[in-house]
Image (cartoon, rainbow, N blue to C red):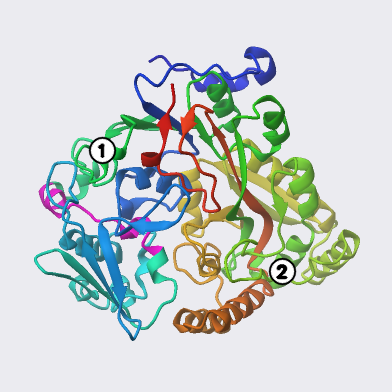
């Protein structure tokens, strides 16, 4: 099928095409075409950056112990059942007998043991390694202090049962198994091909679809996996993913009928899209935060709390959310968004004041730090490529100018951007977190995790509060600890919250089975293309 090139991004959306989308007949092929934000860094769960688009792809080609249904709720996956010991430290998972890899080999508990050890192994450098810390010996293994095979996981009953031993009760642990570190890895294929096991010519997967073609930055094609245990209930023949960082170009391709779904359309286009493509627009409150992170390492200007505080105070979130982004998002004063179960977001101090008062305080803070219009602070603001991110960065740079801040903007492709952030190669940078499970811990760990705590901020008190909340089994007491942690963290200004996400998707009206949900997860196995 011939497809439009990204050069169409330079064509006027209003003039080049009719306002109504002209979807071509895809029912015959039954292949769903999804526009995602970027290429996955890898098809190996241990080598992705943790981007939402990567998790969307991997969710279609792998299945973990637990899975997600069309409405975003946890359901059995490879595990048909599970139970927690009375002391809260041992999870036992009984695996289904019909779980298979796409080459027909059975999926066993050994494949999960291999996967968990793989993510814990410091040689893998997995973005998800810190997620394993609740497991016995995991943290020591990631630091190279203990052997990988000492991880507290074991296969029992000839591979039919997986047991995970935790250091102590961890309230949120089960929810995290929807993440890619909870997927099995094909022990037999890894043994045969080593590091190249996930190359397109070698890879086998255990999910609803299996990858068959990958042209970097252009197209990733999958086909239905006949070995999947629920294959008879899947109507699609395959799913093709298209990395479209230019979201306006993605809208163009959607209206031309070249893609069926566009994930995360620009918020600034919401009103126009709602007017011209009302049946295709899906806007739903979601569990996501957009923020600027400050590098707190001692060799950067933002190591100074006064500068961080001033920069956060000077950002006019209402202008960004309601003017730049057309009211498609909500301004945020906290890291944890509203809508997270059993939690009340704790705002960053000072953001409740008027903008005049905030700007006055911000200028005083900058002056105390030795900067002002006559002695400007030169800062580089980094963001991953995209019109929306660029517009926000330009606006924020203008908001900071009265403080005597001279901003240089730097854009890079998403995978490069986040790889550099993980290396600490930035001063101020755009970041975002879209939660894969409904728990405040998943946002607050951004200030204590090793891989996603981009600014390397640290507080002993914060770490103690988070550790206590992990152990606390009483929901109300745990909530109080988490809220105290957020207050403690945001009071030191390690980041500047900007807005709360709403999931923004364009969906071909002929698609059946799509259900809007707060996690913005839409496994393709539940979707079908109508006639």
In this view, 194 is above or below 299 = above
- Closer to the N terminus: mark 2 or mark 1? 1
Span shown in magenta:
176-192
Q: Residue at x 67, y 74 (%)?
A: 492
Query: Whole-percent x and y of residue 125?
Result: 33, 60
Between 382 and 29, the one nearer to me in the picture? 29
**Which of the image's four quarters has the N terminus?**
top left
Query: In which quadrant of the rendered view does residue 140 lie?
Result: bottom left
In this view, 172 is above or below 97 = below
**Which of the image's four quarters has the C terminus?**
top left
Query: In which quadrant of the rendered view does residue 429 lie?
Result: bottom right
- Residue that badge 2 annotates: 347
Q: Is residue 207 magenta?
A: no
Is residue 254 in view from this perspective? Answer: yes
Query: Whole-percent x and y of residue 435?
Result: 51, 58
Asked if residue 102 lies left or right of residue 383, the reply is left
Q: Residue at x 50, y 72 (%)?
A: 448
Q: Residue at x 46, y 33 (%)?
A: 512
Give the number of the disc on residue 232: 1
Q: Is residue 191 magenta?
A: yes
Crowding near pointer 2: few (<14 within 10 Å), some, many (20+)? some
Is residue 209 in view from this perspective? Answer: no
């Amino acid at each position: 099928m011939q497809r439009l090139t990204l050069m169409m991004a330079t064509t006027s959306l209003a003039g080049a095409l009719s306002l109504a989308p002209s979807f071509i007949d895809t029912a015959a092929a039954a292949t769903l075409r999804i526009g995602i934000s970027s290429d996955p860094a890898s098809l190996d769960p241990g080598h992705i950056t943790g981007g939402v688009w990567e998790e969307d792809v991997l969710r279609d080609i792998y299945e973990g112990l637990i899975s997600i249904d069309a409405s975003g709720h946890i359901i059995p996956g490879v595990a048909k059942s599970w139970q927690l010991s009375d002391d809260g430290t041992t999870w036992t998972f009984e695996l289904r007998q019909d779980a298979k890899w796409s080459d027909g080999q059975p999926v066993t508990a050994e494949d999960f043991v291999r996967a968990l050890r793989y993510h814990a192994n410091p040689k893998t450098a997995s973005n998800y390694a810190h997620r394993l810390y609740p497991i016995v010996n995991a943290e020591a293994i990631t630091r190279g202090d203990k052997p990988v095979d000492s991880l507290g996981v074991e296969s029992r009953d000839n591979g039919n049962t997986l047991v995970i031993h935790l250091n102590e009760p961890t309230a949120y642990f089960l929810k995290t198994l929807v993440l890619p570190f909870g997927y099995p890895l094909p022990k037999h294929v890894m043994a045969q091909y080593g590091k190249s096991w996930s190359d397109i010519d070698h890879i086998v997967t255990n999910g609803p679809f299996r990858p068959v073609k990958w042209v970097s930055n252009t197209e990733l094609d999958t086909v239905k996996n006949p070995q999947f245990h629920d294959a008879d209930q899947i109507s699609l023949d395959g799913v093709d993913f298209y990395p479209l960082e230019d979201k306006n170009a993605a809208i163009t391709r959607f209206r031309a009928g070249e893609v069926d779904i566009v994930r995360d359309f620009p918020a600034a286009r919401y009103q126009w899209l709602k007017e011209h493509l009302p049946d295709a627009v899906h806007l739903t409150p979601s569990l996501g935060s957009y923020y600027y992170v400050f590098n707190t390492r001692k060799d950067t200007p933002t190591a100074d709390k006064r500068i961080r505080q001033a920069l956060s105070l000077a950002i006019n979130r209402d202008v960004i959310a309601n003017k730049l982004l057309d009211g498609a998002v909500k301004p945020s004063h906290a890291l944890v968004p509203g809508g997270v179960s059993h939690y009340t977001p704790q705002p960053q101090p000072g953001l409740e004041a008027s903008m005049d008062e905030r700007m006055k305080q911000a200028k005083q803070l900058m002056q105390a730090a030795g900067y002002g219009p006559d002695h400007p602070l030169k800062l580089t603001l980094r963001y991953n490529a995209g019109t929306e991110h660029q517009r926000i960065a330009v606006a924020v740079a203008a908001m900071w100018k009265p403080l005597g801040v001279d901003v240089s903007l730097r854009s890079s492709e998403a995978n490069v951007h986040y790889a550099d952030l993980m290396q600490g190669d930035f001063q101020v940078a755009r970041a975002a977190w879209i939660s894969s499970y409904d728990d405040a811990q998943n946002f607050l760990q951004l200030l204590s995790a090793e891989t996603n705590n981009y600014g390397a901020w640290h507080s002993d008190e914060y770490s103690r509060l988070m550790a206590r909340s992990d152990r606390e089994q009483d929901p109300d007491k745990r909530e109080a600890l988490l809220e105290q942690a957020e207050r403690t963290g945001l009071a030191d200004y390690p980041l500047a919250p900007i807005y709360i996400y709403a999931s923004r998707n364009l969906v071909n009206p002929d698609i059946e089975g799509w259900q809007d949900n707060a996690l913005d997860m839409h496994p393709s196995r539940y979707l079908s293309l109508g006639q």
